[in-house]
Amino acid sequence: MSDPVFLHPRPCPICSKPATPKMRPFCSKHCADVDLNRWLKGTYAIPAVEPQDEWSQGVEALDADEPQ
């Protein structure tokens, strides 16, 4: 039975050539290495909003309590 993923193959995300079963989702080792390099350099990033830390919240509370 054939692999259901390859009934409708997606193109390589780097060069848009047809992906190969051995290197899926890429077409070649070169494209896989290009993708890995982009992750390692930080080109790809997942956006995140970090909450304020407790220290800055405490400083803001102290500033608000001081008379002006």
Image: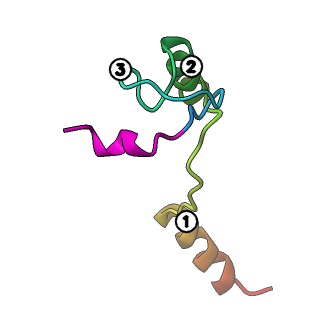
Q: Is residue 9 above or below residue 39?
A: below
Q: Image point 46% across, 40% down: which residue?
A: 9
Amino acid under label 1? Gln
Judged from the image, the secondary structure of the residue bearing numbered disc 2 is helix
Q: In the drawing, does residue 57 fall left or right of residue 25?
A: right
Q: Residue 3 occupies which quadrant of the picture?
A: top left
Q: Is residue 2 above or below residue 52?
A: above
Q: Which mark is residue 31?
A: 2
| Magenta region includes residue 20 | no
Q: Residue 67 occupies which quadrant of the picture?
A: bottom right
Instruction: Name the residue that disc number 3 marks.
Output: 22
Amino acid under label 2? Cys
Q: Image point 38% across, 39% down: which residue?
A: 6
Q: Is residue 31 above or below residue 2?
A: above
The part of the chain drawn in magenta is 1-10
Which marked residue is nearer to the observer: mark 3 or mark 1? 3
Q: In the drawing, does residue 68 fall left or right of residue 6?
A: right
Callout 2: few (<14), some (14-19), or many (20+) C-alpha neighbours within 10 Å? some
Residue at the left extreme?
A: 1
Disc 2 from disc 3: Cα separation:
13 Å
Q: Is residue 67 above or below residue 54?
A: below
Instruction: Name the residue that disc number 1 marks.
Output: 52
Say which label, 3 or 1, has the lower sequence index. 3
Q: Image point 53% across, 71% down: which residue?
A: 58
Q: Image point 81% across, 85% down: which residue?
A: 68
Which marked residue is nearer to the observer: mark 2 or mark 1? 2
Judged from the image, the secondary structure of the residue bearing numbered disc 1 is loop
Say which label, 2 or 3, has the lower sequence index. 3
